[in-house]
């Protein structure tokens, strides 16, 4: 979980999975504590371990660190040169190994650095032990050299899906995981001085005679853990709010099994889905400056790139069109681009032309590099879409979700498209298993798997997908008879309803994640309490504040410019809140004091790019900062891997208490 990642900025609706409160606050607390001036003599060395490097890379760039007086970043576990004239800041985990390395650096007559500030990422469930503090105190030469000893906070749980939805019998491990998670979430609210109205997805069982499983109770248990921590903070922290200042909605991945698997057609999501990116890093080839073969270059797709900010939540067809228009406009206005363009068409360059090119080249080179990068990416994505015939597949996926297609349509697709990739067959069946879990039991399920020619680990992922949905569907299907033949005439089932009043601008953008509907209902105070109970009854003023904030928000007008019409993505003349000509964040207010109370949504088991996009969209629409938290941020390949590793035992009649 991190409170800020490379997709986020200091403005609204960012994905925040609670790694630390914010870039600015982390840097201020960690670096200002030892900063004594701006001269080079007070510049510092920042020493980190493997985990804290990951935290820092998600929080800020090297330029942000150097602005706070850091001139060198080092790894604590590597041999380092002495720098006795410089001060050092240690941002490390509170482990015995790290403390020993720390003491080795600063003890004796010739320490590596002049002065030390030590900061531990703080785990509320396991702060730095007294034993380690005592160990530091024992060395009399060390204490005078320590400028400060501070604790921060960080959490991360990539294995939450496995630990909480896997072995039902090992509830002790699951409870421990939830307790740690609750402490870390509560720490965020304590640091922000926010006291939330805690709501959670209630466990659903078939009837009073049916046993509720551990996975059914995950949101309930986590909400109770967060609430217990908040009660302690309310009594012990000075100036902690005594009435609710925000909303917290706790969910788990079973609330929406389709979102992590379905093809998402926005630029950000489809880049990470189809381009095998490593985090935010994209590797592409550029012409060699020496005239040799092309060279590989790494670029980061993140907020320092204005084109990325503008396009990341746009539909890929819209993004491609905008890039085409920008490139055409750039060539028409830039002399160097015009000259080079004409030269490529066979025209000869005069001495005067070359002189003009040299004069315009610096500006041309910088701008064309940024623009051509995204033109290349969009072109590559569109080629993959054509080669894999993803439009037809994407249409079937969305038809399944909205109840316009069923098993017979999937069977027909497999028989008429034998060259569909193994991964796309798997994803389609995982969506089908989430909607129709009963169709994958017994011989019927085996027949479907044979038709798709799935491998054993793929079959595991499909079976785990249908079992992830919760106890009620599985128990219901286990108590009734079913046919061993394909029941292609059975009524189709929808897991989404079309959004009234929101026609989509682009084809294949019909799908929306469930949290969009939940957040909107929560913002309007229409979320049913039977399904989403409160841990605490809100104060009388809370309703009034939120309602007045919603009423005072004026309707936002959008202008839709004329578009060239791609044959596969025709405009439908509407506003979807995220395909407008600029990034949502560019127009979002930076002063959230004028907004309504924050809404925090926490998803156990991983969040998706589509859910991130929805939080950007709703921040502006609801005039409330929507903060999405989770145990991880998963793209489809990552989620599929987790589902293959998940060990889930299928429920049987023996699991039902009578």
Image: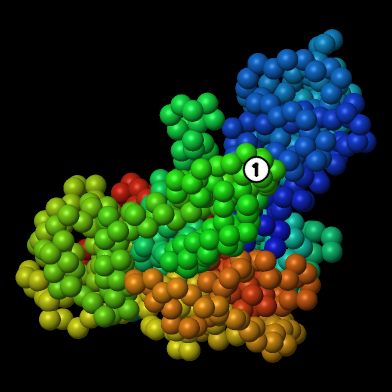
- The answer to whether residue 631 shows anywhere in this view is yes
User: From this viewpoint, which residue is outermost toward the top?
Assistant: 109
Residue at 52% over, 26% down:
290
Near-viewer residue (344 or 503)? 344
Near-viewer residue (369 or 604)? 369
Q: Name the residue under label 1.
A: 352
Residue at 53% over, 38% down:
298
Label 1 neighbourhood size at 10 Å, few (<14), some (14-19), many (20+)?
few
Percent x, y for residue 643?
Answer: 34, 52
Percent x, y for residue 402?
Answer: 32, 79
Location of the C terminus (image quadrant): bottom left
Residue at 63% over, 54% down:
334
Mark 1: which secondary structure?
Answer: helix
Give the color scheme: rainbow, by chain, secondary structure or one colour. Answer: rainbow
Horizontal side of 359 relative to 204 (left or right) equals right
- Rendering quarter of residue 495: bottom left
Horizontal side of 573 relative to 194 (left or right) equals left
Residue at 55% over, 78% down:
561
Horizontal side of 566 relative to 75 (left or right) equals left
- The answer to whether residue 16 shows anywhere in this view is no
């Amino acid at each position: 979980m991190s409170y800020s990642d490379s997709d986020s900025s200091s403005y609204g609706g960012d994905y925040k999975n609670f790694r630390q409160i914010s870039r600015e606050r982390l840097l201020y607390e960690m670096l200002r504590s030892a900063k004594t001036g701006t001269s080079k003599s007070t510049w510092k060395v920042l020493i980190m371990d493997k985990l804290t490097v990951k935290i820092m890379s998600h929080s800020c760039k090297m330029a942000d660190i150097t602005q706070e007086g850091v001139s060198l970043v080092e790894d604590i576990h590597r041999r380092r040169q002495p720098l006795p004239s410089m001060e050092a800041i240690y941002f490390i985990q509170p482990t015995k190994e790290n403390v020993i390395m720390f003491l080795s650096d600063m003890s004796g007559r010739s320490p590596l650095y002049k002065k030390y500030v030590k900061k531990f990422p703080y785990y509320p469930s396991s702060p730095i032990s007294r034993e380690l503090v005592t160990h530091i105190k024992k060395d009399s030469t060390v204490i005078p050299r320590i400028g400060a000893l501070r604790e921060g906070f960080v959490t991360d749980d990539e294995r939450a899906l496995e630990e909480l939805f896997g072995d039902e019998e090992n509830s002790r491990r699951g409870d421990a995981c939830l307790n740690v998670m609750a402490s870390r979430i509560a720490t965020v609210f304590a640091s922000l001085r926010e006291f939330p109205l805690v709501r959670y997805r209630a466990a659903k069982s078939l009837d009073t005679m049916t046993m509720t499983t551990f996975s059914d109770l995950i949101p309930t248990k986590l909400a109770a853990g967060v609430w217990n921590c908040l009660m302690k903070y309310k009594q012990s922290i000075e100036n902690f709010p005594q009435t609710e200042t925000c909303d917290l909605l706790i969910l788990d991945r079973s609330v929406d099994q389709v979102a992590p698997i379905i093809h998402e057609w926005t630029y950000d999501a489809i880049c990470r889905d189809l381009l095998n990116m490593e985090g935010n890093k994209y590797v592409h080839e550029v012409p060699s400056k020496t005239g040799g073969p092309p060279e590989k270059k790494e670029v980061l797709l993140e907020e320092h790139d204005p084109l990325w900010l503008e396009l990341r939540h746009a539909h890929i067809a819209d993004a491609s069109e905008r890039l085409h228009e920008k490139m055409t406009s750039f060539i028409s206005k830039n002399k160097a681009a015009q000259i080079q363009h004409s030269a490529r068409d066979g025209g000869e360059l005069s001495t005067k032309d070359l002189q003009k090119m040299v004069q315009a080249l610096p500006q041309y080179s910088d701008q064309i590099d940024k623009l051509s990068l995204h033109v290349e990416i969009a072109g590559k994505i569109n080629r993959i879409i054509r080669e894999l015939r993803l439009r037809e597949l994407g249409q079937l996926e969305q038809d399944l979700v909205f109840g316009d297609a069923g098993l017979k349509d999937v069977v027909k697709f497999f028989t008429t498209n034998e060259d569909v990739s193994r991964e796309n067959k798997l994803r389609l069946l995982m969506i089908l298993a989430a909607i129709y879990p009963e169709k994958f039991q017994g011989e019927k399920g085996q027949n479907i798997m044979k038709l798709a020619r799935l491998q054993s680990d793929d079959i595991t992922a499909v079976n785990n997908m249908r079992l992830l949905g919760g106890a009620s569907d599985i128990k219901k299907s286990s108590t009734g008879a079913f046919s061993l033949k394909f029941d292609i005439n059975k009524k189709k089932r929808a897991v989404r309803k079309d959004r009234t009043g929101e026609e989509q601008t682009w084809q294949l953008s019909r799908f929306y994640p469930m949290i969009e509907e939940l957040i909107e209902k929560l913002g309007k105070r229409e979320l049913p309490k039977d399904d989403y109970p409160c841990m605490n009854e809100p104060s009388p003023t809370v309703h009034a504040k939120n309602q007045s904030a919603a009423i005072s928000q004026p309707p936002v007008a959008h202008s839709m410019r004329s578009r060239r019409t791609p044959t596969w993505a025709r405009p439908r003349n509407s506003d979807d809140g995220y395909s407008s000509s600029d990034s949502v964040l560019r127009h979002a207010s930076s002063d959230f004091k004028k907004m309504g109370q924050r809404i925090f949504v926490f998803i156990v088991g991983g969040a998706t790019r589509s859910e991130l996009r929805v939080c950007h969209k709703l921040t502006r629409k609801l005039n409330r900062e929507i903060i999405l938290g989770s145990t991880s941020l998963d793209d489809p390949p990552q989620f599929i891997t987790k589902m293959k590793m998940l060990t889930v035992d299928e429920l049987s009649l023996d699991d039902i208490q009578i």
